[in-house]
Every structure is written in C-alpha cells, then in structure tokens.
Amino acid sequence: MADGTGGLPRAVLREQLRERLLARILDGEFAPGERIVESRVMKEYGVSQAPVREALRDLEAMRFVESFPHRGVRVRMISERELAEMYPVRAALEEVAGRAAAPVVTDGTLALLLDEIEAMRAASSADDVHAVLVHDARFHEIIFETADNALLLEVWRSLHAEIRALVTYNRARVGLAEIVESHVPILQALRERDPALAGKQMRHHIEHFGSLAFAAGGADRPTARPD
Amino acid sequence: MADGTGGLPRAVLREQLRERLLARILDGEFAPGERIVESRVMKEYGVSQAPVREALRDLEAMRFVESFPHRGVRVRMISERELAEMYPVRAALEEVAGRAAAPVVTDGTLALLLDEIEAMRAASSADDVHAVLVHDARFHEIIFETADNALLLEVWRSLHAEIRALVTYNRARVGLAEIVESHVPILQALRERDPALAGKQMRHHIEHFGSLAFAAGGADRPTARPD
DNA sequence: CCGTGCTCGATTATCGATAATCGAGGAAGC
DNA sequence: GCTTCCTCGATTATCGATAATCGAGCACGG
C-alpha cells in the first residue's frame, strides 16, 4: 500500500495536500464542475507546484477530479448516467463482499455494524443527511473490510466519488428512514453467517435504490421535491 | 476521461513515458519486484524528473507499480494471495458485463469476438503463451466495451496488472487449448442475446480457472512445473 | 453584421537545482 | 562479540523559474 495512513511518515506534502483538497471537495467548498487552479493552491498552502500536481493526480485516480492536458483540473461532475452505471457494478461488488464476510464475521464486528445503524437512526431523526451518508458508507466499508479481500476493498473505495454523489440526487426521492432501516436485513443475514443470504441482501439493497432512483423518468429529471 | 488516447495532443511527456514504461514492464524488462529509479529513467529518456514521477504515479494508480515515501517505486509483485482475491471480483464484474452486453451486441461485434478466438487458437497451436493472453484479454475487453458502461470498463481495466500476472502462475497448470475453447460458450450465449446465460457463462469461465488455480494447496505454492 | 486570424494574459508542462530522507557500513562503547 | 551511533552515498521530495499551450477578446476583411 502506498496509501495506508497507518505508517508514521505523516509528513509528505503531497499526501497532506491530497487530504486537504479532498476535504474541501467533500465539504462542497470546491463545487462540482469548478476548476482547481494549481497556482492558487500553491499560494494558499505556501508550497510549490510539484506536490500540488501530484496531489491532484492522486485525486484524479480516486475519480474525484478530472484533468485534461493544458486545461487543468476540475471537480468531477457525476452525471445521472454515471450514477446509473454505478449501480450494477456496486451491486455486484457488494454481493461478493457479503458472501466473503458472512462466514468470518465476528460478534465484535456485528456490534460495530449495529452501532453504525444506530448512528444512522440518530442522524435520520436529526434530519442530518450528511451524517446519514457518512455512517451508511462506513457500514458498507466495515463489511468490505471484514471480507478480508484487499483488492475488493480497493475497488469499492474507488467508487467513493460516485457513492458520495448519491446525496445530490437521492435525498429527495427516498426517505432517510427507509435508507437507514434497509440495512437491518443485511445485518441480520450476517448474524446468521449465511453467505448466500448476505450476498443477496447486499445486492438487493443496492439494486433497490438503483431502481428507485432511475425508475420514473429515463431522462434527467431534477429532484422531485426539494425537501 | 483524462486518459483516452483518442485526443489529438499525443505529445505530453508524462503520457509518453507512461506508455514506454508500461511496455517495458509488460515485456518483463522491468521484472516484478525490481526498482525503477527516477534518475535512471530521467537520463535514459533525456527528460526531467517531474514527468517521470507523474508517469510512475499513473502506473501506481493502474496497480502496475507500488511506491513508498522516500523509498521509490518498484514493479508490483502480484502474490498468489492477491491473485486468489482477484477471481471473485473479476467473476462478478464479468457477469455484469455479460448481462449488459448480451442485449445490445451486434453481429459485427460477434464477428470480432470470433476473430479473437481464432487468433487464440492460432497462438495456442504455435504454443505462444503471450499471444494467447493478449487475445484472451482483448476478447473480454470487447465484451466490456459492448456493455457500454464506462465505469464498469474502467474498473475492469484497473485489474489488468493482476490479469496479466496470470501467465506467471497459470500456464503450467491449465492447457492453452482448454483456455481458448472455454471462450466458445460465452460467444454462443452472446449470439443468443441471452443476458442471464451470458452473465452466467462469463462468471463460470472465471470461477473455473480460479478454482483450478487454487484447488490443490491453499498455501502459497510456486508454479508446479516451471514449464 | 458576421466570420477569420492575431495578440495577450492566464495557466499548465517541463526543467534544473536544492533540501530532506533513507539504508548500508564503519567506528566507538560496553 | 555485540549493540549503538554516526557518517556518507544514493535517491526521493520539493522548490523556483522557464517554455509551451490555451481561450478570450479585439482588429480586420468580407
């Protein structure tokens, strides 16, 4: 891994910049479609151009930004088409994760998963969409970690940009509570250590919201109700 | 895309270097585990350090090399464990591709796929392992392209490094002819435009060789026979 | 008034040089 | 004899500056 934050050498400008910029993207300070100008970042952080470029290239590999030669970097705008493309890919990956995780999951991990569901419930009550999404992602990530397949985990993580964008499209169409509670069957299947069932539940979980998101109109329809 | 070779500006040092270095890795000139020293590459191609570093970082995102801060870049050594991890991931992706491609495949594409099978047969007769692998990969890639899901294609391509490494481990255990002919049922399913069947065939195709490769011993066992 | 080509400011791509870091090997201390 | 510390060559990480490229806006000709 050239990435794991576990190592001590926390001081590499490129990595620090990557994290800072990523945080700013996720916080919406850099809006989708907005340009990120190297010279501006340079001055802001008082560093040279090279580490900025490399940090941006890392973010490109993570699919958070896109770049064109001589035309710079901009925050990726995830189209509805790309989101639609994501669902079958993610559904397949989640099924693999569920199958692999079910036979080896520990009681401790099951407790962690329940914690995330509880956190989602709390956030849902507070109508905190952002927090729900964070714990939702963490719930799935725990399962992928449990699956103990480094490649699978890495591939799933490469979809973070798309998963993150779900909030933009989905929040109006599906109730937060429904999202939260739909995780319960997954946890139950894992509790039973049933690989086929866990895989099936995870696949359905993803496909369900995929079909909801793109059921009504095929074309690009803005959020149905702004609230 | 910040990658597609379709654009005209073919002259960007970073990209040229990336292709050159990748070719040298695939040709085995840079052996797995071997270091790639920036200063050496610099002098060899008469360029500066920056584009070399960025090209290497691209290769890292493609999983062909790995890098550690202050310790440079080395060609990734794909362990047998990592290969084992790849099979379920790839099987799931191939199933998605088969399902998506079957309903939309054209007669022209079917002809291309048959061409690749014929090329594999010819290479197999000539005992040209490398050529078989190339056409094998191309066969699958055509199907992923047909599936018309950019994200799916990109994720699959990120596994190239692992797929490529199959040659190291697999050639002794499975006959070339068997590999080649196992593609025929896939083509047949696509001819029938049967999504479920095409997906199933592609999944089985991968899982079959996966189970073959790791059936005998669970532990890390080097290639059974060096030839 | 519209299309064409040119100039110019802004930005990226690349360069050459410097600073920071690593790992190996030897000297010093126990 | 073994461990610890230090030095040194090699390499990576970063810097500051230059060259190449792009896109917008303006002058010119039709």
Image: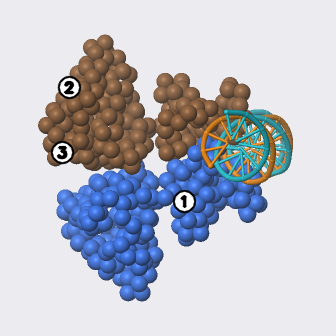
Chain colours: A brown, B blue, C cyan, D orange
Query: Looking at this view, is B140 or B210 the one in front?
Result: B210
Tell me residue C2's x, y (percent): 65, 44
Quadrant in the picture for residue B183: bottom left
Residue drawn where x is 46% and y is 75% of the image: B130
Q: CA distance from mark 3 to mark 1?
A: 36 Å
- Residue highlighted by disc 1: B33
Name the residue carrying label 3: A195
Return the disc, 3 or 2, that comes first in the chain's sequence: 2
Residue A18's disc is none
Q: Contact, CB < 8 Å: mark 2 with mark 1?
A: no
Q: Nearer the viewer, residue B93 or D12?
A: D12
Give the mark toward the camera: 3 or 2: 3
Q: From the viewer's perspective, tell me whether residue B152 is left or right of residue A46.
A: left
Compared with residue A156, is residue A123 higher up or lower down, i.e. above or below?
above
Q: Residue at x 36, y 64 (%)?
A: B221
Q: Which residue is mark 2?
A: A181
Q: Secondary structure at mark 2?
A: helix
Choose mark 2 or mark 1, whichever is in front: 1
Q: Is residue B118 above or below residue A162?
A: below
- For mark 3, give the secondary structure: helix
Q: Can residue B174 be seen in this snapshot?
A: yes
Within 10 Å of disc 2 (Cα), the crowding (few <14, some 14-19, many 20+) is: some
Tell me which amino acid carries mark 2. Glu
10 Å neighbourhood of mark 1: few (<14), some, or many (≥20)? some
